[in-house]
């Protein structure tokens, strides 16, 4: 196949095209009895599909079906969505927000960071908070050690997201000091935190991949979930995906079936994914394809019961299809890793307490002392309350003994409100809120009970 390059895209042309043909967004609650249809028509541009899916995902919508077409100069999408309880989207404020966010006034580039420079530790100020990025070899109690270092330096964790996959850990944390300020250009404090975090991530291992840690300023901030995908992708966590059948990070029931075929007459590679359905599945796949520099021209998304089926018609940004077995294998491994990074079966602990310096350190220490390993975590702050969710296993990757959970609840229940939930493999579990000013459904209930 002859190489067909993606044309140069002039940003000024985008502004001109949007003025002539502004994006059209419509919310339809009449055509389907069980979901809301979101229809989007706009001028096509690189990265637009990820931008739209990211907005819908951040609203905690469940995408049950979607039809994507962006071959040529126009982008036309239809999304079938519900809220986390499976109901239509009827809140006028949310509908107004969607129409503004996806409409002509809300369209801003969300590409953010296009590449990861190989740094293992990044610390940079963002407004009144400092963002810290960490990646290294996972081990029991590592999150507790990280949060203990931050607490000893009098830093409070305002928000954080922690993922583990294939024995690697990636963290993005927002912290401030006792005066609610970022570290800014305090080089001495930055050097101290860099040194101590590097020491923890190195541990006692001799592996070069583990020991290479560094400190950096000036990263352009991007969407937190996308950043975690980028970090683990650059860390090549996908290379060990599928190597062993005893991968504790992904239960067998979640192993996706991914195939790649080529349509000669149309010049597309077709990526077919069939796996257990869950929240944010489409975002994880589209995010990975985008960061691997593949363009999605058409797509069809559907779910039936606990299973999802997704097809993407793609080409590389240089116009080429996936012609070699090596290219296909790499894409399959990367998509499989992207799906598995967010998978959690077992027990989730939802905690609510008055926010303070050392709260995360205290909670993770208690989890560690009770023999629990955190495989994924989300931390947020609403007003004066710290809201955390931890997906936990025992130290060997096995399901948690509920007697341990009962003992833990008694130990911290006096100062921290605890809600324990089992996360079955075939449900779309509610995710932690990405915004610092929003409270998700289960955190809302937890916070209300705590305040009462």
Image: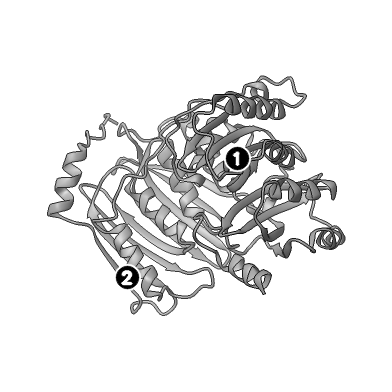
- 81 to the left or right of 171: left
- Mark nearest the camera among 1 and 2 is 1
Vertical position of residue 235 compared to residue 179: above or below: above
Number of numbered discs visible in the structure rendering: 2
- Residue at image point 74% right, 61% down: 416
Residue 151, horizontal then vertical, whole percent = 69, 41
**Can residue 329 be seen by looking at this rendering?**
no
Residue 20 visible in the shown view = yes
Looking at the rendering, in which quadrant would you find the N terminus?
Answer: top left
Q: Which quarter of the rendered picture does the C terminus lie within?
A: bottom right
On the image, the x and y values in percent for residue 202 come to 70, 25
Kind of element beneath mark 2 = strand
Helix, strand, or loop for circle 1? strand
Which residue lies under the disc numbered 1? 171
Q: Position of residue 58 (x, y in %)?
A: 46, 57
Residue indicated by mark 2? 27
Query: Which residue does the image show at 30% across and 64% down from the upper left?
Result: 99
The residue located at (26%, 45%) in the rendering is: 45
Give the left or right position of residue 256, taking residue 359 as reference.
Answer: left
| Between 53 and 435, the one nearer to me in the picture | 435
Q: Quadrant of residue 266?
A: top left
């Amino acid at each position: 196949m002859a190489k067909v390059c993606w044309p140069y895209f002039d940003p000024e042309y985008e502004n001109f095209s949007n003025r002539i043909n502004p994006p059209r967004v419509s919310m339809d609650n009449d055509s389907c009895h069980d979901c809301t249809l979101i229809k989007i028509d706009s001028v096509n541009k690189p990265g637009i599909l990820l931008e739209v899916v990211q907005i819908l995902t951040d609203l905690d919508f469940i995408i049950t079906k979607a039809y994507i077409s962006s071959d040529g100069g126009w982008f036309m999408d239809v999304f079938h969505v519900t809220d986390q309880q499976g109901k239509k989207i009827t809140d006028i404020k949310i509908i107004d927000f969607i129409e503004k966010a996806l409409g002509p006034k809300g369209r801003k580039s969300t590409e953010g960071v296009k590449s990861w420079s190989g740094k293992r530790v990044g610390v940079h100020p963002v407004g009144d908070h400092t963002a810290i990025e960490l990646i290294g070899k996972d081990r029991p109690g590592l999150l507790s050690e990280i949060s203990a270092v931050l607490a000893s330096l009098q830093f409070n964790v305002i928000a954080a997201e922690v993922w583990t996959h294939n024995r690697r850990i990636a963290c993005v944390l927002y912290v401030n000091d006792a005066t609610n300020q970022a570290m800014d250009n305090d080089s001495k404090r930055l050097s101290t935190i860099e040194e101590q975090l590097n020491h923890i991530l190195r541990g006692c291992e001799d592996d070069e991949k583990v020991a290479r840690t560094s400190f950096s300023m000036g990263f352009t901030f991007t969407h937190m979930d996308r950043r975690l995908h980028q970090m683990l992708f650059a860390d090549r966590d996908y290379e060990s995906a599928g190597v062993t059948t005893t991968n504790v990070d992904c239960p067998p029931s979640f192993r996706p079936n991914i195939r790649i075929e080529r349509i000669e007459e149309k010049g597309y590679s077709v990526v077919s994914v069939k796996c257990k359905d869950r929240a944010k599945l489409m975002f994880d796949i589209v995010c990975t394809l985008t960061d691997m520099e593949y363009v999605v021209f058409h797509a069809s998304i559907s779910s039936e019961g606990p299973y999802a089926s997704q097809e993407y018609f793609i080409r590389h940004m240089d116009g080429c299809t996936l012609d070699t077995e090596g290219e296909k294998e790499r894409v399959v491994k990367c998509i499989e890793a992207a799906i598995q990074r967010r998978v959690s079966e077992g027990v989730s602990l939802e905690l609510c307490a008055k926010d303070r310096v050392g709260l995360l350190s205290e909670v993770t220490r208690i989890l560690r002392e009770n023999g629990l390993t955190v495989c994924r975590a989300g931390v947020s702050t609403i007003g004066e309350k710290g809201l955390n969710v931890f997906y936990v296993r025992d130290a060997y990757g096995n399901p948690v003994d509920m007697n341990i959970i009962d003992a833990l609840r008694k130990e911290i229940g006096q100062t921290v409100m605890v809600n324990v939930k089992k996360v079955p493999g075939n449900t779309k579990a509610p995710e932690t809120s990405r915004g610092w000013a929003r409270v998700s459904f289960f955190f809302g209930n937890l916070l209300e009970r705590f305040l009462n």
